[in-house]
């Protein structure tokens, strides 16, 4: 059996920024492998593409930024009025420091994560790019086991993408 749509794989892996010598950004060990249902569009495309067709055993592959978290976009650095950080009549100064990652809502009520870049007198410059936008990734790991997805996997867990039973 090989990884394909509607296949569940148990994986142990490590993801590095840039290449195998880069910073480790995610690690899943063989004692607690991740069970993943493939073919439901819940993984970054380069991760899924890199594993499609693999059987059990070791693997390694590169993921270009456009197949990971996309390019870094300057237009996603946005000045936000300081009024957005008010709690009643009090400015939430505990939130306002450079490199702080905060959750905000856009005008449609969707949650966004942004990182504070600069603090000015009247506004705060926030970067809404994913922290890994514009960065290539390198993945190494082991496919521990494979099985065909059950109806339960496909129906009950297609929303989360993990293929597991404890979401």
Image (tube, rainbow, N blue to C red):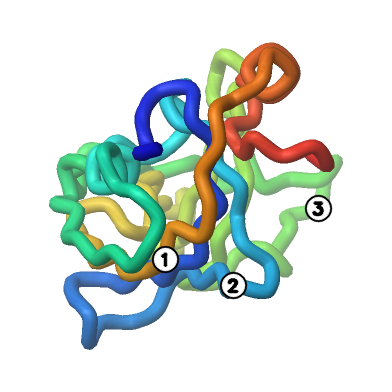
Q: Which residue is mark 2?
A: 30
Quick check: 24 left or right of 155? left
Give the mark nearer the N terminus: 3 vs 1.
3
Estimate the x, y position of residue 151 in percent, counting from the top left: 68, 13
Q: CA distance from mark 3 to mark 1?
A: 51 Å
Give the mark nearer the N terminus: 2 vs 1.
2
Q: Quadrant of the N terminus?
A: top left
Q: Does the residue at mark 2 contact the one at mark 1 (Cβ under 8 Å)? A: yes
Secondary structure beneath dot 2 equals loop
Estimate the x, y position of residue 56 in percent, counting from the top left: 40, 55
Residue nearest the observer in this picture, 70 or 27? 27
Q: Quadrant of residue 45?
A: top left
Q: Which residue is mark 1?
A: 142
Residue at 74% from the left image edge and 18% from the top image edge: 152
Q: Is residue 91 above or below residue 24?
A: above
Secondary structure beneath dot 3 equals strand
Estimate the x, y position of residue 160 in percent, counting from the top left: 64, 30
Q: Which residue is mark 3?
A: 90
Q: Does the residue at mark 2 contact the one at mark 3 (Cβ under 8 Å)? A: no
Residue at 14% from the left image edge and 52% from the top image edge: 64
Q: Is residue 28 above or below residue 11?
A: below
Q: Residues within 10 Å of mark 2 (few under 14, many from 20)?
A: some
Query: Which label sits on residue 122?
Result: none
Q: Residues within 10 Å of mark 1 (few under 14, many from 20)?
A: many
């Amino acid at each position: 059996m090989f990884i394909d749509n509607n296949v569940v794989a148990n994986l142990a892996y490590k993801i590095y920024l840039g290449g195998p010598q880069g910073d480790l950004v995610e690690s899943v060990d063989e004692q607690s492998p991740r069970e993943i249902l493939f073919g439901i569009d819940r993984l970054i495309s380069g991760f899924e593409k890199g594993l499609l067709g693999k059987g059990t055993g070791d693997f390694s592959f590169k993921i270009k930024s456009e197949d990971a978290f996309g390019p870094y976009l300057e237009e996603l650095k946005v000045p936000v009025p300081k009024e957005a950080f008010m709690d009643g009549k009090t400015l939430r100064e505990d939130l306002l420091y450079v490199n702080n990652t905060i959750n905000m809502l856009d005008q449609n009520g969707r949650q966004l994560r942004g990182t504070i870049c600069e603090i000015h007198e009247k506004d705060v410059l926030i970067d809404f790019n994913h922290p890994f936008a514009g960065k290539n990734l390198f993945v190494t790991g082991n496919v521990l086991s494979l099985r065909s997805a059950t109806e339960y996997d496909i129906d009950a867990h297609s929303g989360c993408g993990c293929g597991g039973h404890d979401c």
